[in-house]
Image (cartoon, coloured by chain):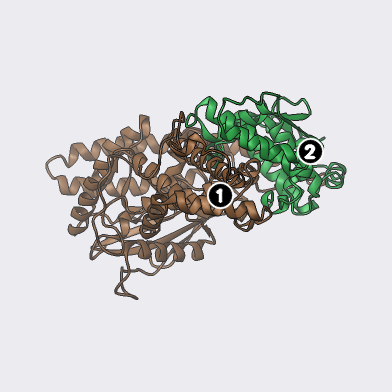
């Protein structure tokens, strides 16, 4: 990809000669729109640009794949993202030419309509609608009874269950801290047990029916458990088997308090999503954690965001580039007929998410603990990115998810004006050059005429900006 | 039109299928998409909802496109998209492009209309004068291509080449017929096609 970008820059270096000659050719045969047709394909240019930006984002945490050259460090994720978009623009420069000027915007128009009709991105964060199987005239009474049962009886019972559980958990934690205050190791062990119990209490409150397949997780040295992510509930589903240390972002509010004070016995690693410096720190702390032997195994959700349990986003390679680590893939698949466990944190609060699940019939899920994988076990040349893709493949197959190569960070990232601006600059260049080419043609048609003044200064009175580099 | 209900009635589907270039399956896919776009469930998709599509928001032409699509209900949505279907007739595609260019909706594509669209394309990178020259030349080329004033095109081009000194200030515009004829040699089908 990097090589391509360089080629793009090369093309940008001598655009004038090539472009104008192409334009003159176009004058000879106006109907030649071969390159235009290639624009209308299944993937629009913007989508392709986003994809390219994604590829470059995988290099974020450190070593560039392939040559092993260290990536130039950038200030923030956002900047990196934008730069990749810009580079992608350079590569696609050549596609705009060779159209009559009035037709020039049409590929863009077509692209826009394609984006209206579908985009990869929203698909992954869209709640899937499951048509209720009992929603018809014959079973209407049954459905109604179900509603009364779910909202009138199950829901209050479940809230009661979690309230009692929480109070008991809080009391037990305090007692533990008091009793074992001189023996921190014993205190941590007890607290971990309590957390496992409390997780089980949450799952019970959703009437969780969870089938676990494969080898149960336990404390193992150098183990990283890696799972697909749909909701905070994933964590509870796994935690009721074994205490895990998770790597995740620090939330605000009540969840943040719990993260910092209740879960500290697990050795969880929290980071703030926006701070790049934090990421290096995270990497170091992951390595430290793996070096210890008597700590809970690490649990990482490498998608970095909650997905609707139908698709699987690109795995960030952070979890896959730690030397000597053994990766245990975990595939979680919820059965949406009973409850939809997708939490879109930008749409609903966690409390509301739980209300939705508590008023559903039950949380039903299959959890597959897959065979451990190690980087380079099949191919010694395997890069972290390839390893991440291999693990993702295994999870997708086990859980029946559709793999998508987009980055979860987009959910929170805004494509800024810079990209549009650069694109506009390009289009302005193309328009100007086509005008110049036209004039050259006109001058050629009238060789007797005096040399027009514009040839001396092509950009006369025209503010133009070349875009060779960003 | 079933705009406010969450399921598409059979009659409505048949009606929409008949009036568009899409098949029943495609209409159903479009309906699912329409419901996703219509975040507040109002039965219409407005500009703000369109702008929430990340890829679309990065398109330079987005203000004009959103203008065309703003506030559509499902039937109108399909009707607009119909021009991009694989089986859409060439006339429908041309009509859409014409509508796209005819910003003020007066039935002709005037200099001002093209200026508006091209301004979106180039942003602040060209000044008024340069853009105007490009637009005038573009319209002249089109008029030449459809034979309305073939002889004058070369002349005009030459006049333009000599600079603003030779003002050719009649308001340039394209009627619907001229527009269609000018694009005669252009493979619009290949340019405007979207897979549903």
Specify the chain shown as green.
Answer: B
Residue B11 locus on image (x, y percent): 88, 43
Which of the pair A160/A86 is nearer the observer?
A86
| Residue A341 visible to an observer of this rendering | yes
A213 shown above or below B66: below
| Residue A147 visible to an observer of this rendering | no
Which of the pair A183/A231 is nearer the observer?
A231
Which of the pair A258/A429 is nearer the observer?
A429
Identify which residue is drawn at 59% across, 51% down.
A98
Q: Quadrant of the N terminus of chain B?
A: top right
Identify which residue is drawn at 46% across, 31% down.
A462
Residue A70 locus on image (x, y percent): 23, 55
Give the crowd class for mark 2: few <14, some 14-19, many >=20 residues within 10 Å: some
Q: Are marks 2 and 1 on the same chain?
A: no
The residue most toward the front is A448
User: How many callouts does the rendering have?
Assistant: 2
Residue B148: mark in rendering: 2
Task: Please say if the residues under marks 2 and 1 sit with CB atoms less than 8 Å apart.
Answer: no
Residue A245 locus on image (x, y percent): 29, 50
Identify which residue is drawn at 76% across, 48% down.
B184
Secondary structure at numbered mark 2? loop
Specify the chain shown as brown.
Answer: A
Secondary structure at numbered mark 1? loop
CA–CA distance in space, label 2 to label 1: 26 Å
Which of the pair B12/A261 is nearer the observer?
B12
**Residue picked out by circle 1:** A97
**Circle 2 chain:** B
Residue A47: mark in rendering: none
Tell me if A61 is positioned left or right of B77 in this view. left
Tell me if A381 is positioned left or right of B76 in this view. left
């Amino acid at each position: 990809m990097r090589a391509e970008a360089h080629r793009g820059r090369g093309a940008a270096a001598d655009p004038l000669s090539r472009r104008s000659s192409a334009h003159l050719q176009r004058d000879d045969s106006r109907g030649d729109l071969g390159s235009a047709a290639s624009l209308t394909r299944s993937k629009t240019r913007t989508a392709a640009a986003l994809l390219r930006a994604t590829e470059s984002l995988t290099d974020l945490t450190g070593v560039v794949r392939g040559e092993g050259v260290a990536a130039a460090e950038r200030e923030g994720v956002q900047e990196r993202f934008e730069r990749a978009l810009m580079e992608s623009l350079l590569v696609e420069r050549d596609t705009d030419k060779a159209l009559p000027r009035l037709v020039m915007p049409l590929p863009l128009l077509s692209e826009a309509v394609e984006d209206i009709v579908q985009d990869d991105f929203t698909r992954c964060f869209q709640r899937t609608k499951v048509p209720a199987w009992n929603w018809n005239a014959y079973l209407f009474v049954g459905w109604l009874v179900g509603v009364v049962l779910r909202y009138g009886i199950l829901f209050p019972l479940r809230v009661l269950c979690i309230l009692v559980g929480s109070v008991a958990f809080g009391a037990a934690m305090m007692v533990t801290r008091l009793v074992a205050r001189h023996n921190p190791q014993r205190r941590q062990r007890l607290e971990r047990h309590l957390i496992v119990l409390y997780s089980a209490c949450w799952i019970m409150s959703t009437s969780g029916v969870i089938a676990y397949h494969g080898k149960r997780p336990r404390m193992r040295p150098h183990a990283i458990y890696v799972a697909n992510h749909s909701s905070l509930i994933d964590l509870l589903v796994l935690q009721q088997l074994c205490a895990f240390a998770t790597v995740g972002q620090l939330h605000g509010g009540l969840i943040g308090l719990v993260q910092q004070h209740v879960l500290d016995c697990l050795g969880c690693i929290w980071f703030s999503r926006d701070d790049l410096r934090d990421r290096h720190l995270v990497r170091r702390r992951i390595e430290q954690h793996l070096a210890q032997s008597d700590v809970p195994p690490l649990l990482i959700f490498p998608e970095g965001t909650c997905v609707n349990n139908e698709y699987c986003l690109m795995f960030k390679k952070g979890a896959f580039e730690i030397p000597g680590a053994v990766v245990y893939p975990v595939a979680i698949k919820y059965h949406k007929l009973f409850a939809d466990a997708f939490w879109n944190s930008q749409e609903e609060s966690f409390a509301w998410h739980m209300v939705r699940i508590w008023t559903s019939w039950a949380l039903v899920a299959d959890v597959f603990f897959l065979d451990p994988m190690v980087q380079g076990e099949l191919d010694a040349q395997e890069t972290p990115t390839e390893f991440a893709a291999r693990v993702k493949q295994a999870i997708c197959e086990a859980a029946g998810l559709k793999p998508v190569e987009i980055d979860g960070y987009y959910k929170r990232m805004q494509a800024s004006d810079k990209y549009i601006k650069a694109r506009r600059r390009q289009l302005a260049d193309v328009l100007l050059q086509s005008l110049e080419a036209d004039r050259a043609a006109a001058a050629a048609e009238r060789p007797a005429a005096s040399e027009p003044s514009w040839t001396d200064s092509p950009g006369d009175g025209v503010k133009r900006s070349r875009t060779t580099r960003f | 039109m079933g705009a406010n209900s969450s399921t598409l009635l059979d009659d409505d589907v048949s009606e929409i299928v008949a009036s568009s270039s899409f098949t029943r399956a495609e209409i159903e896919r479009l309906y699912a998409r329409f419901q996703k776009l219509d975040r507040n469930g109002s039965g219409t998709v407005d500009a703000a909802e369109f702008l929430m599509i990340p890829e679309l928001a990065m398109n330079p032409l987005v203000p004009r496109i959103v203008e065309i699509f703003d506030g559509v209900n499902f039937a109108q949505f399909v009707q607009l998209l119909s021009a991009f279907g694989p089986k859409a007739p060439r006339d429908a595609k041309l009509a859409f492009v014409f509508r796209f260019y005819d910003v003020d909706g007066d039935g002709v594509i005037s200099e001002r209309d093209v200026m508006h669209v091209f301004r979106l394309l180039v942003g602040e990178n060209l000044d008024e004068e340069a853009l105007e020259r490009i637009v005038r030349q573009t319209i002249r080329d089109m008029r030449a291509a459809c034979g309305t004033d073939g002889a004058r095109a070369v002349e005009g081009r030459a006049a333009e080449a000599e600079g603003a000194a030779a003002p050719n200030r009649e308001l340039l515009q394209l009627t619907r017929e001229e527009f269609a004829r000018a694009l005669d040699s252009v493979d619009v089908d290949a340019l405007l096609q979207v897979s549903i």
